[in-house]
Image (cartoon, rainbow, N blue to C red):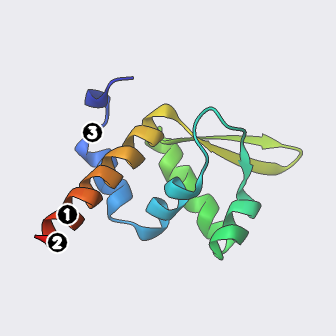
Amino acid sequence: MSLEEITDQDLLYVKNSPIRTLVLNTLPGPEEDYVRVRQLAASLEKDPGTVNFHCRGLEGHGLVRTEIVTREKNVKLTDKGAMVVDKIRKKQSVRRSDKRR
């Protein structure tokens, strides 16, 4: 997947929501195992329903992948999601370095 496949809409969808940004930043890389949504919610100190809602939206943009195993929803970052996280982090670090000047 190339960087051109990340749309401005994908970036704005994540950047304009602190919880979606937090979810993506908290998830391990795409090569790692799935994480239970309930465990993710507990680590973020958020309601599991809220985290699940945002995970569905992120999945709609292709940024995370979900699976249901024994009635538990699991989530993991996709390659596209990892690229969005990297791009947002780079933009934030550029802004921070500009403020120091």
Residue type pointed to by label 3:
Thr
Label 3 residue SS: loop
Answer left or right for 40 relative to 53: right
Q: From mark 3 to mark 2, how far is it between C-alphas?
A: 29 Å
Q: Nearer the viewer, mark 3 or mark 1?
A: 1
Contact? badges 1 and 2 (CB < 8 Å): yes
Quadrant of the rendered image containing residue 21: bottom left
Above or below, comparing residue 28 to residue 3 in the picture:
below
Q: Which residue is mark 3?
A: 7
How dense is the environment of label 2, judged by Cα within 10 Å: few (below 14), some, or many (20 and up)? few
Contact? badges 3 and 1 (CB < 8 Å): no
Q: Which residue is mark 1?
A: 97
Is 55 or 18 nearer to us in this picture?
18
Q: Which residue is mark 2?
A: 100
Is 65 or 99 nearer to us in this picture?
99
Query: Which residue shows up at 58% across the image and 41% down it?
Result: 29
Contact? badges 3 and 2 (CB < 8 Å): no
**Quarter holding the C terminus?**
bottom left
Residue type pointed to by label 1:
Ser
Q: From mark 3 to mark 1, how far is it between C-alphas?
A: 25 Å
Residue type pointed to by label 2:
Arg
Is 57 or 78 nearer to us in this picture?
78
Label 2 residue SS: helix
Is 39 or 97 nearer to us in this picture?
97
